[in-house]
Image: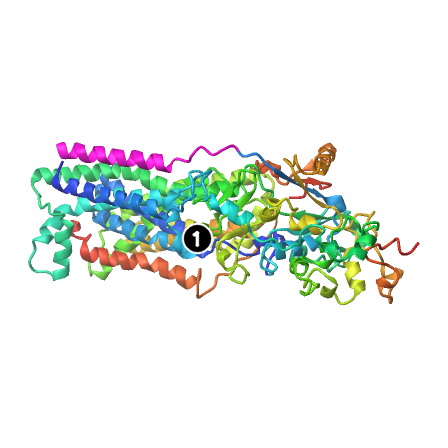
Amino acid sequence: MNFEGFIYPNEAEIYWSVLIAVYPYITGLVAGAFIVASLLRVFNVAKLRPVYRLSLLTALAFLLTAPLPLVAHLGHPERAFEIMFTPHSSSAMAGFGFIYAWYLLVVLLLEIYYDYRKDIVSWASRVSQSVIKGFIYRILTLGDRDVSEEAVESDEKVVYWITVIGLPSAAFLHGYVGFIFGSVKANPWWSSPLTPIIFLFSAMVSGIALVMMIYVFGSKLRGKKPDAACVDTLASYLLYSYILDLSLEFVELTHIFYAAEEGTELIARLIVDKLFLTFVGIQMVAGALIPILLIVLTKLFKPKMQTAIFTLASILTLIGVFAMRWNVVIGGQILSKTLRGFSSYSMPVFGAESLTLALGILALPFVILYILSWLLPPWEAES
Amino acid sequence: MKRRKFLLSILGLGVAAAGLQLKVKSSKSTKPAYLFFVDVTKCIGCGRCVIACKIENDVPLEPIYFRTWIERYTWLKDGELKVDSPNGGFGGFETEITEILEKDEIEKSYFVPKLCNQCEEPPCVQVCPVGATFKTEDGVVLVDEKYCIGCRYCIQACPYGARYIYPSSGPVKSRVGTADKCTWCYHRIRKGLEPACVKVCPTGARQFIFLDSEDQDSAYKTKLQKIKQLKGLRTLKPEMGTKPKVLYYGIDSDVR
Amino acid sequence: MRKVSTRILILYFAGVIIFFALRAVLVPPTFGEVGWYRNASVEEIAGLETKIGEEYRCFNCHGNEFAEWSVGEHRNISCESCHGLLKSHAENPEETAYDEFLSLKAFNSSIEFCLSCHGVSVSKPESFPQVSVEHNKYWDCLRCHNPHNPVGGES
């Protein structure tokens, strides 16, 4: 047992492991990627056209992975469905099943389906392709091959309205994840009305960075040049959401230290000592300040390697936002509820709730995305 | 158009039926039937309560799983406060505090037994996503080991550190992977017996009161009267709004 | 409504029906009877076996000890405090009377056993009788004190 000061004896074990840091990270990426898509649909940011479908598929790939870390950490995974059969109305966590189902079935799948419908119909009648693909497309048409002008127009309308519904849904999906932590009054590092909003904006930051990264590397892999104007626009939105995100975190920290309630000294020690590397080092400097500087300087001086630098900024951002999730989830638990000490967390490399499992879960969406883009190529629109 | 209307109306009916089914049957108002009283001025830190609890309730013997435990609070003359709880006070405190701190530095020191507060407003019950932990009609918070999914949210929500996840090393296999906590020995108090920790406490530092014991001897009523007249009764972390039902006598506000 | 949209609606509606069908089957019987929990579990927990014997059952056999204990300074201390949770022994006297953790057998000597309560500590209430090493270093406490009536024996 490794602890410092005084902790309640039952606190020696860290009950929410790295997997629970992975979970809000993934839902954040989903929400963020969806917001990128809606920038085009609802706010008419035309320069983002090349990443529109890609960001939808990315959101879907990550959303499909999102329940995995949760189920994997349950003491009784076989009882997971109770959360949908008998959801307890006063529990923030009980909303998960329904919010997830709504977001997956009503928002993402429908938006992707109606957006691709015209293409699916044409692919279904294409002759030169593998038997499996043709079979899947024929099922996906649902027996309606109407691609008349009115039908396509109606599809477009449906997509628009789903996006309009989807925006608040995305905000809710991730805001509620923030609320799961923010509503725990026993924990001074979590308990804050700002937590859901901070989660939301950091989700936007991470989602934009993710789409940018996948777009650039995806283009390279196919031997295409990524559209510079599109990457530049993504970088701008990354910068805007960073500004909002950091301002909120600044407000939060200022409030903690200005109000200086019980436990503030301990929070200070948490930041400058226990979480120095992951909070100050990775989340704040390497994962926020440096990417912001990179973006701002690139925008000012317009060097040749523009896209490469933006991509570097997006990778740093993705690492920084993961550090933020880690600092919330793990940091909040090593801070003892006695407000007199710290427990410690050491992540196992192999086995249940381990580093390898977390990395595996984080790699899975890329596999899913690969399969999805084989079935529903997101690149067609660009050429 | 006809088909659309038909489908919509069926959907509407379905949702309405679902809503009805999901609605909680108006739960009867609960009335607390028990009260726990801890007289810190009597506790000698012998740790028999911790042992008895672990045996009576099949709590794993490892030093990081407790339904009840004892903390030792020691104030130094310079105002500094030291708290420790080696092995939760299981079987007493082997190391006298004077072996850790200089005796003439010590201002005062006492033991504080801890257990589930059986809150009137339990945050653990509030956050349970499936209804596996709940407050009974007589006011005790229990965990349904057959229904708990082991999400650990209740552990995060408890301000008192009273919960843990039952490990596979524990003797009761059906409890593995579910949340476990003090029940005030619900299997005993429902039979009219005092909780194990109270039963073995040699000094009366732990006292249990059956509030609606009309047919039982009125000793509990006199006890309750005496406790109510005490000055300086406290509950732990009252600012959490949890309304604990464990009353402490003789603790400072620093005890939490 | 367009054909495709109707079909999607039918699919989703089928999903909802399957969900409620599963729910009807899988939610345990007594769930929600009283509150948002499985009501049967209350009695399951209340019905768990106790491990401490019934009150005063010890004295059915140990009459002499009762006579000493009931008038001594330790009369407010239950048998289980020092002898352990011996329900199995109470039900079958053949079973061992020594608890692994809560009896003399858990300690190296009777001195250690007595000191587990009566050792000196600044954390104990001052009024509680505490015995320093000077009081007795070598002798078994039991030579002078009867644990069932510890002070009475001396006078």
x and y percentages locating residue A67 in the rendered image:
36, 52
Residue C126 visible somewhere in the drawing: yes
Residue A199 falls in image quadrant: top left
Closest to the observer, B137 or A227: B137
Closest to the observer, A35 or B213: B213
Q: Which residues are magenta?
A: B1-29
Q: Amino acid at mark 1?
A: Ile
Taking the spot 66% from the left edge, 46% from the top edge, the residue there is: B194
x and y percentages locating residue A209 in the rendered image:
33, 50
Residue C79 falls in image quadrant: bottom right
- Disc 1 crowd rating (10 Å Cα; few below 14, some 14-19, many 20+) is many
Taking the spot 30% from the left edge, 39% from the top edge, the residue there is: A167
In the image, residue B215 above or below residue A333: above
Q: Chain letter for mark 1, please.
A: A
Indicate the quadrant containing the C terminus of chain B: top left, top right, bottom left or bottom right: top right
Residue A132 falls in image quadrant: bottom left
* Residue position marked by numbered label 1 in the rendering: A20
Answer left or right for C20 relative to C90.
left
SS of the residue under disc 1: helix
Q: Looking at this rendering, what residue extends furthest in the right direction?
A: C155
Closest to the observer, A317 or A225: A317
Question: Is residue B166 rendered magenta in the image?
Answer: no
Q: Looking at this rendering, what residue extends furthest in the front direction?
A: C60
In the image, residue B229 above or below residue A298: above
